[in-house]
Image (cartoon, rainbow, N blue to C red):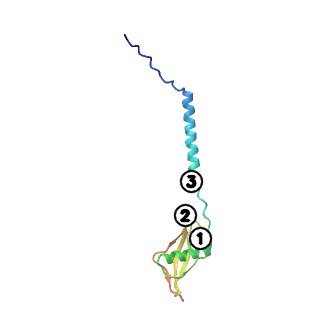
Amino acid sequence: MFFEERPRRSLPRPSRRWIGASLILAVAAAGSVALLTRDAPPEPLTPVPVARAEQSLERQLRSGGGPNGSVRCPGPIRPRRATRCEFLYPDGDTQLMLVTLTARGELDIEVPYPAQRRPGG
């Protein structure tokens, strides 16, 4: 006796319309995930008021092992431009420093070279 082979069942092939709709849904889902998980745009930087900038700069200089003294700035520290501030030593000498506001909102000090320390009067 011969056994008859059962005919193989093939899976139905999806239609092109179904494939197209599935691709569109997958792209839309990926786009939604990308939009929902992205970082918020950074807040625009606002100028740092004079009093707060001076206190912050004094703390920053002391924590870096610098001498005690005070800082004087002519105005608020604004984004994307340097402000000429002075460090006042206890003996009356002054040191010029350029202060900028970084993109992260931190105060950055640069002492021009050669250092321009002026004796006090």
Along the line of sight, the residue nearer the viewer: 76 or 23: 23
Q: Identify the residue shown where x is 44% and y is 17%.
A: 7
Quadrant in which the N terminus is drawn: top left
Instruction: Mark 3 vs mark 1: give the one in front.
Output: 3
Q: Give the mark nearest the N terminus, 3 or 2.
A: 3
User: Which residue is disc 3 drawn over?
Assistant: 39
The residue most toward the bottom is 121
Residue indicated by mark 2: 104
Identify the residue at image location x=51%, y=72%. 109
Residue farthest front in this picture: 1
Q: Residues within 10 Å of mark 3 (few under 14, many from 20)?
A: few
Looking at the rendered structure, the secondary structure element under dot 2 is loop
Residue of label 1: 77
Q: Residue furthest left?
A: 1
Quadrant that contains the C terminus: bottom right
Q: CA distance from mark 3 to mark 2?
A: 15 Å
Name the amino acid, label 1: Ile
Image position, residue 114 (x, y; %): 45, 77
Q: Quadrant of residue 49?
A: bottom right
Please determine whether, in this image, residue 85 is positioned above or below residue 81. below
Residue 6 drawn at (x, y percent): 43, 16
Spatial distance from mark 2 to mark 1, Cα to Cα? 14 Å
